[in-house]
């Protein structure tokens, strides 16, 4: 069965029902984050050491031509659209979970190059030893900022839905800048761009957390978790990238 359109919004429900919806949403968010960490651990801890020439094959696929990364980005956008469609409009719980799972896997794959640079190249350790310092710092900063922004929404109860159009326009502008940088290659996206994207991700967290209270129906905890995970992933990506750029 699909969603019941008569299902209440959390803000319209009783305190116990609203608390249960929020617990389900953040439990699924925690599960998505743990799955993301598990996939990255599998890639870097098991697959990479056991597959000879993994680095050459993987990075050759992503960066073999000037437009390889653009193709990867377009594929990620397509997969993200499909994952969101399944999660938000899925006709069964299995399809909704498939959407969330697909998105987590796609995020894990697109993160590999950045994590590789952060772990193996940034500090230039002898012998190519792994260093997880920057990844740990980025993770702590991301979770701290996420917790602070979440607290603002829950303590104030403010509806941040007005940020929706602003975030959409800013997102398209950012995507256009990234595509121009890839296609024309005449400029690099430096630290200031990363800081701007961190602000965009923070706004996205405010917007999606507000939606958990005001816009998602009580049966949309999977979709709510996906939207929050997407915002956290965006924030973590650019926090880590900013740390790498500042270290350089």
Image: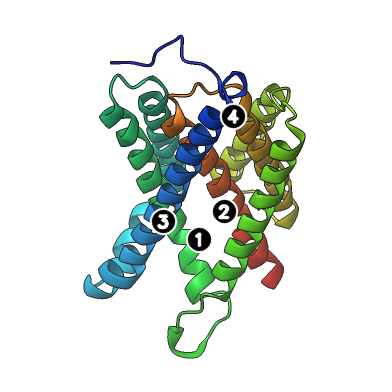
Give the class, few, some or many, for how many residues have Cα within 10 Å of label 2's Cα (few <14, many ≥20): many
Q: Is residue 116 above or below residue 220?
A: below
Locate residue 18, reporting x and y percent: 55, 30
Secondary element at tag 1? helix
Select label 2 or label 1 by which is in front: 2
Labels 3, 1: front one: 3
Q: Identify the residue at image location x=62%, y=68%.
A: 137
Q: In the structure shown, which secondary structural element does the residue marked by tag 2 occupy?
A: helix
67 lies left or right of 145 = left
> How many other residues sit within 10 Å of disc 1, few (<14), some (14-19) or many (≥20)?
some
| CA distance for labels 4 and 2 | 35 Å
Which badge, 4 or 3, is on the more N-terminal residue?
A: 4
Marking on residue 114: 1
Quarter of the rendering occupied by the C terminus: bottom right
Of pointers 2 and 3, the one earlier in the residue sequence: 3
Q: Is residue 78 above or below residue 37?
A: above
Task: Residue under label 4, please give it.
Answer: 15
Instruction: Mark 3: give few (<14), some (14-19) or many (20+) Cα within 10 Å.
Output: few
Give the label on residue 34, or none: 3
Residue at mark 3 to residue at mark 1: CA–CA distance: 19 Å
């Amino acid at each position: 069965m699909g969603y019941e359109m008569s299902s209440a919004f959390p803000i319209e429900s009783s305190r116990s029902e609203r608390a249960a919806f929020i617990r389900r949403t953040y439990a699924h968010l925690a599960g998505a984050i743990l799955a993301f960490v598990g996939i990255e651990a599998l890639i870097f801890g098991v697959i990479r050491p056991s597959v000879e020439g993994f680095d050459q094959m993987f990075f050759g696929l992503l960066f073999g031509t000037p437009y390889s990364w653009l193709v990867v980005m377009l594929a990620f956008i397509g997969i993200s659209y499909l994952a969101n469609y399944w999660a938000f409009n899925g006709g069964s719980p299995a399809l909704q979970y498939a959407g969330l799972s697909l998105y987590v896997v796609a995020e894990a794959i697109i993160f590999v190059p950045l994590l590789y640079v952060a772990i193996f190249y940034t500090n230039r350790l002898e012998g190519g030893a792994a260093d997880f310092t920057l990844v740990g710092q980025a993770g702590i900063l991301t979770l701290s900022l996420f917790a602070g922004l979440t607290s603002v929404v829950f303590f104030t109860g403010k509806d941040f839905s007005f940020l929706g159009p602003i975030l959409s326009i800013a997102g398209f502008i950012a995507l256009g800048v990234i595509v121009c940088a890839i296609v024309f290659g005449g400029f690099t996206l430096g630290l200031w761009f990363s800081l701007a994207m961190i602000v965009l991700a923070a706004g996205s967290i405010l917007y999606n957390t507000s939606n958990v209270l005001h816009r998602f129906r009580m049966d949309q905890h999977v979709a709510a978790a996906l939207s929050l995970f997407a915002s956290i992933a965006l924030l973590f990506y650019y926090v880590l990238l900013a740390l790498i750029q500042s270290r350089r």
